[in-house]
Image (cartoon, rainbow, N blue to C red):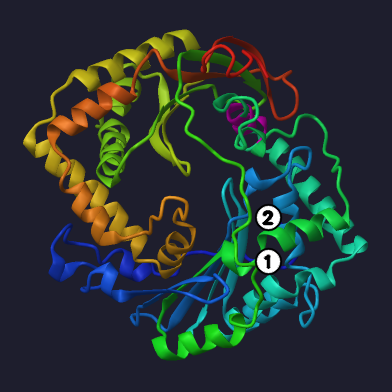
């Protein structure tokens, strides 16, 4: 978001990033030698605030993340962007903090900060010198307990203009415009809370006022709806004393706010949409959905993505870029929802490439990958690549704090590097092959064909569609 004077938070563990030499050796594991369950202290305050603390003394800094169950899925029907606007308003002061003063003080103390609203959460991230932990916790307690006291119509008008400007900026940038929201609209049936998280239509107006903003904050920014994660060079006893000082007195209601259910909706067929934009980059986006029952399945999905597009010699990358010469970039990524996962293939094509031809080449490459047996050496290589990538990410105290704070509370999961390792290295060749064959089905997927048209509307739009993703009656064939 673009709140004045805000600074985007960047990972600071650059030097240690390159220290990951051994892949799995415990003696060289870069994060810590003790198991995660032992080095992460977890407790819940009497008011319901969940707290996770991990001491990491390798850098004299601390990362603080407060996450609320207050994402875009929680926007009431007809009040799109309400969660996002509330996030903006929390930077506009509180009972004891002037507008934008919190950010100014963090920066003056040598820190960085950011906030974001996702489908499922609103999260506030700060990273400061370790001795500034009291400042970070005080500001978060102000955000939780006293923000509504500083809200007024003038500040709301300013933030509504900021949000409108963000949408206009995304429209002008092409790739961040209508393409993501067009997909989101297609990926869930009518009435599903995820469907409207990006469904803003053509209007940029907001149908709510200050009382709606205050109501949303009072409903969702409560201790029982929040998780606080702290990772860094801290004394655990002192950190817990500070947490009690700033948060134990914040009143809760005793129950978490009710949330719209976000059930898994499996794909039942194939749907193709044709999308045109002004960006001179044609492409294919193919999305598959699954619901992994455990961490082993999730880690196998990551291995599948590595096998497909880990580098230019991976199976899909080699087929489209080297053999066919029709793609400039190919990637397979994973999208996690509370109860489901999606495997997404992006193939950005050379200009003038025929999209239907590209789709046939991609389908053939995926079919060959699914049928090609996984050998022992390849299995080991895939595990090493996935594990090394996770260790590199986990070197950042910000990354770990964010993962701790935003891990799904609905299913009782928590980010645990040791559990991830055990799950990853237990994946068998047979499991990987079966998962690939089951997930990458040509009968159950969403295909987005992206074409360049210099006369397309700003931000792009869907120009044609066919097929249905969901069973008849679960969703209309067109938005």
Element under disc 2: loop
Q: How many marks?
A: 2
Residue in the foreground of this view, choosing between 305 and 357: 305
Q: Is residue 264 above or below residue 68?
A: above
Residue at left offset 38%, top offset 59%: 414
Q: Can I make out residue 433 in this image? A: yes
Is residue 329 shown left or right of residue 456? left
Dot 2 corresponds to which residue?
1
Residue at left offset 45%, top offset 25%: 266
Highlighted range, magenta:
177-184
Residue at left offset 54%, top offset 21%: 282
Residue 52's label in the rendered image is: none
Please say if the residues under marks 2 and 1 sit with CB atoms less than 8 Å apart: yes
Dot 1 corresponds to which residue?
6
Rendering coords of residue 431 (x, y %): 18, 33
Question: Looking at the rendering, which quadrant does residue 392 occupy?
Answer: bottom left
Residue at left offset 83%, top offset 52%: 160
Q: Is residue 172 above or below residue 407?
A: above
Rendering coords of residue 204 (x, y %): 82, 38
Element under disc 1: loop
Rendering coords of residue 273 (x, y %): 57, 15
Is most of the magenta stretch helix, strand or loop? helix
Q: Can I make out residue 354 in this image? A: no
Residue in the foreground of this view, choosing between 156 and 165: 156
Q: Quadrant of the C terminus?
A: top right
Q: Is residue 255 above or below residue 33?
A: above
């Amino acid at each position: 978001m673009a709140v004045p004077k805000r600074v985007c938070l960047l990972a600071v563990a650059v030097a240690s990033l390159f220290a990951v030499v051994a892949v799995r050796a415990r003696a060289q594991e870069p994060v810590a030698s003790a198991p995660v369950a032992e080095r992460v202290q977890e407790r819940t305050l009497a008011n319901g605030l969940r707290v996770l603390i991990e001491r990491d003394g390798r850098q004299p800094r601390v990362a603080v993340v407060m996450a609320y169950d207050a994402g875009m899925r929680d926007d009431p029907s007809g009040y799109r962007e309400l969660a996002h606007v509330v996030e903006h308003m929390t930077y506009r002061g509180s009972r004891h903090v002037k507008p934008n003063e919190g950010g100014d003080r963090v920066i003056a103390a040598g820190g960085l900060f950011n906030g974001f609203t996702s489908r499922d959460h609103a999260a506030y991230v700060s990273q400061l010198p370790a001795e500034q932990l009291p400042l970070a916790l005080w500001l978060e307690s102000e955000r939780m307990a006293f923000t509504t006291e500083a809200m007024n119509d003038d500040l709301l008008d300013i933030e509504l203009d900021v949000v409108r400007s963000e949408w206009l900026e995304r429209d002008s940038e092409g790739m961040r415009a209508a393409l993501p929201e067009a997909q989101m609209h297609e990926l869930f049936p009518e009435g599903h809370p995820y469907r409207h998280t990006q469904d803003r239509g053509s209007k940029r107006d907001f149908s709510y006022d200050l009382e709606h903003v205050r109501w949303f904050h009072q409903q969702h920014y409560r201790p029982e709806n929040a998780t606080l994660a702290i990772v860094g060079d801290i004394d655990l006893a002192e950190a817990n004393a500070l947490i009690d000082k700033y948060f134990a007195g914040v009143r809760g209601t005793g129950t978490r706010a009710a949330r719209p259910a976000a059930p898994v909706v499996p794909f039942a067929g194939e749907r193709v949409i044709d999308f045109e934009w002004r960006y001179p980059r044609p492409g294919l986006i193919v999305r598959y959905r699954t619901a992994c029952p455990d961490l082993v399945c999730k880690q196998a999905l990551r291995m599948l993505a590595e096998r497909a597009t880990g580098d230019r010699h991976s199976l899909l990358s080699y087929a489209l870029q080297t053999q066919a010469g029709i793609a400039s970039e190919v990637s397979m990524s994973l999208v996690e929802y509370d109860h489901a996962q999606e495997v997404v293939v992006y193939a950005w094509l050379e200009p003038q490439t025929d999209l239907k031809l590209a789709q046939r080449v991609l389908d053939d490459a995926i079919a060959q990958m699914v049928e090609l047996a996984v050998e022992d050496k390849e299995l080991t290589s895939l595990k090493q690549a996935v594990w090394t990538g996770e260790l590199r990410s986990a070197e950042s105290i910000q990354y770990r704090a964010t993962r701790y704070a935003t891990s799904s509370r609905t299913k009782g999961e928590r980010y645990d590097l040791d559990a991830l390792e055990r799950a990853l290295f237990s994946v068998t060749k047979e499991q990987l092959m079966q998962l690939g064959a089951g997930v990458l089905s040509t009968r159950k997927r969403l295909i987005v064909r992206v074409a360049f048209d210099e006369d397309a509307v700003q931000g792009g739009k869907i120009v044609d569609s066919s097929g249905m993703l969901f069973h008849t009656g679960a969703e209309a064939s067109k938005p």
